[in-house]
């Protein structure tokens, strides 16, 4: 059956080549689009984590949704010890609260973050986003870094004084003047506006917090995220919450899932076109060979074998198209993974979503596998009607068919 099916494909080489080309072109397009889609999404998720959020954070129970200055991590040293036991080196401690910042004429509410510069630079790349001035240093006594939008709203520039006002550990007002040493112009949501960064030690003294911290931020490879999160949740009893980045910012993950759903819709449309092309080729081939089929049945070929031969032809056409399309698609993904696709003309739009101006394509293994299997399934389904028609032929009528 396989030999006969292959002979029939070669015998109608032009028609077969058109079908294989259509399958290959459709699959190449799908693989490249998946590569671009996954490149954007993976870039966005990595940037969100690397910029400031981290892969996971450890807080006091219910802190993330109801942040209060006196709701601190019960035992930061224990958390850090557990991280070190799992050979995790990229972590940092922070203190977080809401405060009022005032310049010479304007004021603005914002999130005040106390950071340890050394461990922060080991964990995130927030320091690299300072494009004017510098990042805070461990020996800074009264210094701060602001987002560009916040600095503009306050009407301050490098070297100016900014007044920070907030409630301390006991609920009393605490105020300090700090010097603006750095400004961040990243274009990213949540960084350029509504954020002020000060040295951790300075903030702890300002609000009379001792050595308390609000959160421990951890940076992990994606493949370790679930295992480490599960381990920390088991080892840290009541009083802690361990949240992955998408637990804290679910809209990011939901957006990725929604876009993937649209790509699956597009995949379905392409599959219908592929199936129609293959079915047309196999059906035409079957109609051209009705006389041949009648002779085969008269010589003892069963209806099942005849239908199987038609299905094999369809699968061979699909497999050839998949082989060519997969090769071409992966070559495109590989090329643009290195060369990148420049979106700098849309920089103002994409930067706010933590997306770099140059997208490097990459494709998730599951998306590649599902797309290839879907095309092969479409090829098999496309052969059903021609196979049924072939199996229903009557030998005498088929032999007399011209």
Image (cartoon, rainbow, N blue to C red):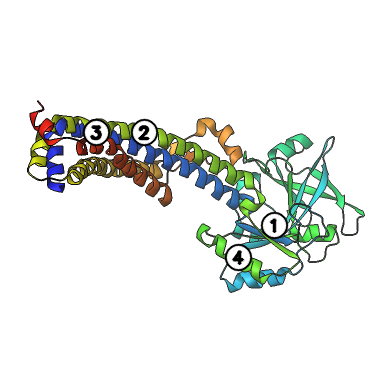
**Would you identify the image quadrant in which residue 149 lies?**
top right
Left or right: 206 in relation to 181: right
**Few, some or many residues within 10 Å of mark 2 (<14, 14–19, 20+):** some
User: Gap between marks 2 and 1, in whole Å?
Assistant: 60 Å
Marked residue nearer the N-terminal end (2 or 1): 1
Q: Is residue 74 above or below residue 11?
A: below
Residue drawn at the location 60% of the way across and 65% of the way down: 230
CB contact under 8 Å: marks 1 and 4: no
Marked residue nearer the N-terminal end (1 or 4): 1
User: Gap between marks 2 and 4, in whole Å?
Assistant: 42 Å
Q: Nearer the viewer, residue 264 or 226?
A: 264
**Mark drawn on residue 272:** 2
Residue drawn at the location 43% of the way across and 37% of the way down: 341
Residue position for label 1:
137
Residue position for label 4:
230
**Few, some or many residues within 10 Å of mark 1 (<14, 14–19, 20+):** some
Rendered location of residue 84, percent (x, y):
60, 71
Q: Secondary structure at mark 4?
A: helix
Left or right: 315 in relation to 147: left
Question: Mark 3 or mark 2, which is nearer to you?
Answer: 2
Q: Is residue 354 above or below residue 49?
A: above
Left or right: 10 in relation to 355: left
Q: Is residue 228 above or below residue 106?
A: below
Left or right: 132 in relation to 106: left
Q: Secondary structure at mark 2?
A: helix
Rendered location of residue 18, percent (x, y):
22, 31
Question: Mark 1 or mark 4, which is nearer to you?
Answer: 4
């Amino acid at each position: 059956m396989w030999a006969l099916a292959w002979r029939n494909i070669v015998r109608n080489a032009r028609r077969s080549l058109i079908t294989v080309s259509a399958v290959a072109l459709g699959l190449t397009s799908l693989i490249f689009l998946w590569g671009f889609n996954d490149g954007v999404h993976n870039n966005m998720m990595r940037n969100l984590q690397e910029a400031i959020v981290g892969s996971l954070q450890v807080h006091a129970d219910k802190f993330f949704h109801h942040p209060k200055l006196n709701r601190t991590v019960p035992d930061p040293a224990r958390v850090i010890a557990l991280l070190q036991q799992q050979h995790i080196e990229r972590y940092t401690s922070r203190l977080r609260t809401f405060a009022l910042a005032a310049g010479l004429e304007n004021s603005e509410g914002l999130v005040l973050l106390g950071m340890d510069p050394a461990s922060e630079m080991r964990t995130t790349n927030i320091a690299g986003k300072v494009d004017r001035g510098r990042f805070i240093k461990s020996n800074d006594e009264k210094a701060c870094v602001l987002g560009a939008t916040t600095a503009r709203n306050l009407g301050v520039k490098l070297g100016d004084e900014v007044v920070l006002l907030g409630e301390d550990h006991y609920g009393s007002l605490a105020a300090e003047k700090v010097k603006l040493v750095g400004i961040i112009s990243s274009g990213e949501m949540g960084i350029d506006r509504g954020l002020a960064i000060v040295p951790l030690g300075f903030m702890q003294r300002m609000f009379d917090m001792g050595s308390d911290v609000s959160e421990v931020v951890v940076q992990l490879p994606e493949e370790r995220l679930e295992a480490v999160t599960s381990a920390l949740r088991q080892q840290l009893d009541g009083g802690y919450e361990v949240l992955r980045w998408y637990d804290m910012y679910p809209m990011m993950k939901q957006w990725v899932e929604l876009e993937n759903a649209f790509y699956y819709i597009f995949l379905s449309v392409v599959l219908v076109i592929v199936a129609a092309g293959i079915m047309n080729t196999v059906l035409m081939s079957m109609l051209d060979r009705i006389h041949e089929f009648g002779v085969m049945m008269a010589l003892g070929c069963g209806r099942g074998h005849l239908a199987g031969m038609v299905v094999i032809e369809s699968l061979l056409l699909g497999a050839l198209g998949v082989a060519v399309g997969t090769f071409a698609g992966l070559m495109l993904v590989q090329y643009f993974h290195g060369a990148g696709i420049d979106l700098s003309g849309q920089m103002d739009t994409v930067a706010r979503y933590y997306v770099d101006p140059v997208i490097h394509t990459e494709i998730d293994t599951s998306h590649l596998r599902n797309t290839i299997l879907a095309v092969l399934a479409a090829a098999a389904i496309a052969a059903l009607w021609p196979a049924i028609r072939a199996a229903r032929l009557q030998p005498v009528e088929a032999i007399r068919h011209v």
